[in-house]
Image (spheres, rainbow, N blue to C red):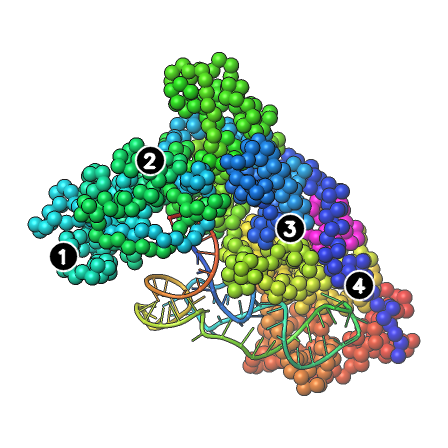
RNA sequence: GGGCGCAUAGCUCAAGGGCAGAGCACUGUGCUGAUAACGCAGGGGUUCGUGGUUCGAAUCCACGUGCGCCCA
């Protein structure tokens, strides 16, 4: 039998089946870099409408992880798609460079503390550290295929940026948003320093545990004729002199209990347990809702002060008495409660942990040494109900390992209720688009509840608070003049200048204190909260760089940023301009393992981007990002990745098949739609439909829809039907025949559209395929325009829906016969149809119906009843070239094993 | 402990009061001209649990469990 395979036009392409991503991706990165594709995209869209995705700065203290990779890839997908749609899309990546984690890591490296180290020297080391990791992360992000202005990123430690921070703080201060007040912070009296949360280690410690009676005062002091007391519980007796309130839970029940030791008010849920500690019994005389107690008064037995009962919903019903001793100067919860009730923040303890003059009997004594004396004193007053010891987790200094205390110190705050700011924040939140929509509620609830923003930190690594203190009257001073002088010098020399230079050198010559006329100055030692740094990035980046604009179109970050960057950015922007710095905020969930648990070293379930890139390639990571619904938590595991590799191979193969069949086609060979087969016009309509739905999904930031739509398109419509069907036309029809050229015209349209639609996600593969495309017009796929949107021919699509229901039926019948071993290939099938005249007319309206179904013959006959399809083995002989069983096989005596069509082609007569 | 959110096939996602559906994976099978590919068919579900509303609940409500983020 003759071998006709050489007379058949098989696919040819340099685009390999095996992706070899790990090896090839770096070559494409090099190509994009050397050909300056990012810059060319900007040039191409110069003068077009802007679309700014403003990058939230990752923290520059380590390698990227899957969370940061997810975030950057999502941003890259958005930016690339908008760029191809013709928007001008400068993307300026940034890094957050100041703050505690870097300070902590550098101090550890240097094996020293912030009090022992030389500030200026240390700041240089910290800056080097931040720069080093920003550079490392930059390479890691680039490796993911992320496009951006990598040569000109923004760093929060650059002098320009720092000057913006100074300026923004100053403007807020000058317009009355900033004030100083006391706030409790962790304090190590051994190291004599404030400690950040990261510098705290919790260890089990024994503490005194005492129950103290605080007698009622005021109208309620005698209840049903009895003298009663609130019973409070504390493990820090030394904070009792600073007591300012008793907190009760407003929704819980409290009882007045009569006992041999006196009458006490305490939580109904706890009174029996508390009495049991002393083996007492008692009886309930009265009961109250916690709410009723609020506003009552009592006497602090140590100070004699008459103080109020307040409500707090954190009051526990599982330990203590339900009446919580509240000292706003010595605890964070107490502090916030104190703010709500405007209680004084007293903290009569000095930097070495000793009571100050205010606490007369024990002044100069260390608070821990005072504990037993205080307890003895309470006992002598007859208010000590019970004393024991308790072991609980207590904070210790990471450096000296000594227990720490809460002590109030002066801090700088931003007042959220100044000038209607809180209201403005809420209005602006309502005006923005939140994706997913729940984000609006989340940040709204936080903004409604949030306390004033504590802006100061007692640290080294950050931007100084540009305030001077008059040496004569000790008033803090910040004026337009002092501010612009500092800002100017920071812009020139960086914020180290604050440490290097004296106050006199930082201030304009002849500057005098507006309060007392004083002329000598101290500098503020505190630095700004690092959240303030990133919170002004919209100013530092969007308003200072050429070609950018304020506000940004999109902020896109993890959902934790509702409290973080989204909020701090919103506050600074609203405080300074009255407007939100973003129009749309997109949030994503966190990366978790196959079981939905977060990744941690202790669980041993950590996967790194580096691992994925090494074993599968960055492209698979990009596909993973696109395939998952990022609005929830995002799962990853080896099996998920393995699955994606299969999916990737499927898409890649479809691309390869399309490319292979275009090897001898150039755009000049194009066939007009009117001259195509109907099925070709159907394919174009289906493509159009896909372009519309995919574009809509991109615009709604629903990339997993993009992924599904494109993958389904490749599988359901291309591989399963259209491409399978086209093989006969492509392989066996005349090389330049209209039917073959028409098919190629459609395939080229499909391929170029598909590559464009895929490019924001599968950037490497789209580029690789594009470079293999004969007759490509542009240097890079990313310089192409997004496929044009046009309404698909709905009537045509509907008509073909009916065809596909028929096809489904035929395929099932063929499969039955295959199982019966009657036929193998569907081409061996003869289809007999009986059905209503309507069905028969419908089927007869298709040209080349057997080809569309990949069978050799179809006969249709009108009849009553249901549509009926039967399959027989065809009587015809198989053409050895096109493999169709055809009645004309043998007609041409020169080629007895071919059908007429093939015989003509082989003999050189094109058809 | 509080606020916000999530839970549908082994995996990724649909269906948002009316028969629970795709793709991948799996199984069977065809083809050998997409070949470490492609086609066809099939199996696979307590829709996290319990209770409620309803003629009818994966869907609405309540409680619970598990998980995540934020706060304490």
Q: CA distance from mark 3 to mark 1?
A: 78 Å
Residue A801 is left or right of residue A393, and the answer is right
Quadrant housing the C terminus of chain A: bottom right
Label 4 is found on which chain of the structure? A
> How would you rate the neighbour count of disc 1 (Cα within 10 Å): few for under 14, some for 14-19, many for 20 or more?
few
Q: CA distance from mark 2 to mark 4?
A: 92 Å
Residue A521 is left or right of residue A879, and the answer is left
Q: Are marks 3 and 4 in contact (CB under 8 Å)?
A: no
Residue receiving disc 4: A11
Q: Are marks 2 and 3 in contact (CB under 8 Å)?
A: no
Range of residues picked out in magenta: A762-783
Which residue sits furthest left? Answer: A225
Q: Is residue A529 above or below residue B17?
A: above
Looking at the image, tell me whether mark 3 or mark 4 is earlier in sequence order: 4
- Identify the element where label 1 is drawn: loop
- Residue A121 location, quadrant: top right
Residue receiving disc 1: A260
Name the front one of labels 3 and 4. 3
- Identify the element where label 4 is drawn: loop
């Amino acid at each position: 039998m003759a071998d006709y395979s050489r007379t058949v036009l098989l696919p040819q392409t340099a685009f390999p089946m095996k992706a070899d991503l790990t090896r090839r991706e770096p070559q494409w990165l090099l190509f994009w870099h050397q050909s300056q594709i990012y810059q060319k995209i900007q040039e191409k869209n110069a003068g077009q409408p802007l679309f700014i995705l403003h990058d939230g700065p990752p923290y520059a203290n380590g390698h990227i992880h899957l969370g940061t990779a997810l975030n950057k890839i999502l941003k890259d997908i958005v930016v690339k798609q908008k760029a191809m749609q013709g928007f001008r899309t400068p993307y300026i990546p940034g890094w957050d460079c100041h703050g505690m984690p870097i300070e902590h890591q550098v101090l550890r490296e240097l094996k020293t503390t912030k009090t022992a180290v030389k500030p200026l020297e240390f700041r240089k080391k910290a800056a080097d550290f931040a720069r080093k990791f920003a550079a490392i992360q930059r390479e890691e992000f680039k490796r993911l295929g992320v496009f951006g202005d990598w040569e000109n990123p923004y760093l929060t430690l650059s002098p320009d940026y720092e000057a913006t921070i100074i300026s923004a703080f100053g403007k807020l201060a000058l317009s009355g948003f900033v004030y100083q007040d006391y706030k409790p912070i962790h304090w190590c009296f051994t190291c004599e320093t404030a400690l950040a949360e990261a510098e705290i280690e919790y260890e089990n410690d024994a503490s005194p545990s005492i129950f103290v009676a605080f007698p009622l005062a005021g109208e309620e002091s005698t209840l049903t004729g009895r003298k009663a007391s609130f019973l409070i519980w504390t493990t820090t007796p030394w904070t009792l002199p600073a007591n300012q309130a008793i907190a009760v839970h407003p929704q819980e029940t409290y009882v007045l209990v009569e006992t041999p030791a006196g009458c006490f008010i305490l939580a109904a849920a706890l009174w029996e347990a508390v009495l049991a500690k002393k083996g007492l019994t008692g009886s309930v005389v009265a009961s109250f809702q916690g709410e009723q107690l609020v506003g009552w008064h009592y006497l602090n037995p140590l100070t004699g002060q008459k103080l109020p009962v307040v409500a707090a919903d954190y009051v526990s019903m599982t330990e203590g008495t339900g009446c919580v001793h509240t000292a706003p100067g010595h605890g964070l919860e107490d502090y916030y409660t104190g703010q709500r009730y405007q209680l004084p923040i007293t903290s009569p303890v000095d930097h070495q942990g000793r009571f100050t003059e205010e606490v007369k009997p024990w002044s100069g004594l260390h608070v821990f040494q005072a504990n037993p004396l205080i307890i003895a004193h309470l006992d002598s007053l007859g208010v000590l109900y019970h004393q024991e010891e308790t072991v609980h987790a207590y904070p210790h200094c990471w450096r000296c390992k000594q227990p720490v205390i809460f002590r109030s110190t002066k801090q700088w705050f931003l007042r959220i209720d100044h000038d209607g700011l809180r209201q403005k924040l809420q209005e602006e939140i309502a005006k923005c688009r939140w994706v997913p929509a729940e984000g609006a509620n989340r940040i709204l609830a936080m903004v409604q509840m949030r306390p004033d923003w504590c802006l100061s930190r007692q640290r080294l690594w950050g931007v100084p608070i540009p305030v001077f203190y008059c040496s004569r009257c000790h008033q803090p001073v910040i004026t337009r003049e002092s501010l612009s002088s500092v800002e100017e010098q920071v812009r020139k020399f960086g914020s180290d200048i604050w440490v290097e230079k004296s106050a006199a050198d930082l201030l304009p010559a002849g500057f005098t204190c507006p309060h007392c006329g004083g002329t000598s100055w101290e500098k503020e030692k505190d630095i700004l909260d690092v959240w303030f740094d990133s919170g002004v990035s919209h100013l530092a980046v969007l308003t200072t760089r050429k070609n950018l604009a304020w506000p940004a179109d999109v902020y896109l970050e993890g959902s934790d940023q509702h409290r973080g960057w989204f909020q701090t950015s919103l506050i600074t922007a609203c405080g300074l301009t009255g407007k939100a710095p973003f129009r749309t905020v997109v949030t994503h969930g966190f990366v978790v393992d196959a079981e939905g648990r977060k990744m941690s070293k202790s669980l041993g379930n950590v996967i790194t981007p580096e691992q994925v890139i090494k074993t599968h390639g960055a492209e698979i990571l990009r596909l993973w990002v696109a395939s998952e619904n990022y609005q929830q938590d995002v799962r990853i595991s080896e099996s998920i990745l393995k699955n994606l590799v299969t999916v990737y191979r499927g898409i890649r193969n479809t691309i390869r098949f399309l490319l292979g069949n275009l090897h001898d086609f150039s755009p000049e060979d194009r066939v007009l739609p009117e001259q195509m087969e109907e099925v070709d016009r159907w394919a174009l309509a289906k493509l159009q439909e896909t372009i519309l739905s995919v574009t809509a999904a991109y615009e709604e930031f629903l990339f997993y829809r993009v992924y599904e739509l494109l993958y389904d398109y490749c599988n359901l419509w291309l591989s399963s039907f259209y491409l399978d069907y086209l093989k006969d036309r492509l392989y066996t029809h005349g090389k330049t025949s209209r039917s073959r050229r028409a098919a190629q015209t459609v395939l080229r349209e499909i391929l170029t559209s598909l590559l464009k639609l895929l490019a924001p996600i599968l950037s490497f593969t789209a580029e690789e395929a594009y470079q293999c495309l004969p007759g490509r017009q542009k240097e890079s796929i990313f310089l192409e325009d997004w496929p044009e949107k046009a309404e698909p021919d709905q009537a045509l699509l509907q008509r073909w829906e009916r065809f596909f229901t028929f096809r489904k039926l035929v395929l099932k019948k063929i499969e039955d016969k295959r199982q019966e071993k009657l036929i193998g290939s569907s081409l061996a099938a003869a289809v007999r149809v009986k059905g209503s005249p309507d069905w028969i007319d419908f089927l007869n309206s298709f040209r080349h119906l057997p080809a569309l179904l990949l069978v050799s013959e179809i006969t249709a006959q009108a009849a009553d009843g249901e549509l009926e399809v039967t399959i027989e083995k065809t009587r015809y002989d198989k053409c050895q070239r096109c493999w169709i069983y055809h009645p004309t096989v043998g007609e041409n005596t020169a080629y007895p094993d071919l059908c007429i069509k093939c015989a003509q082609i082989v003999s050189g007569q094109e058809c």
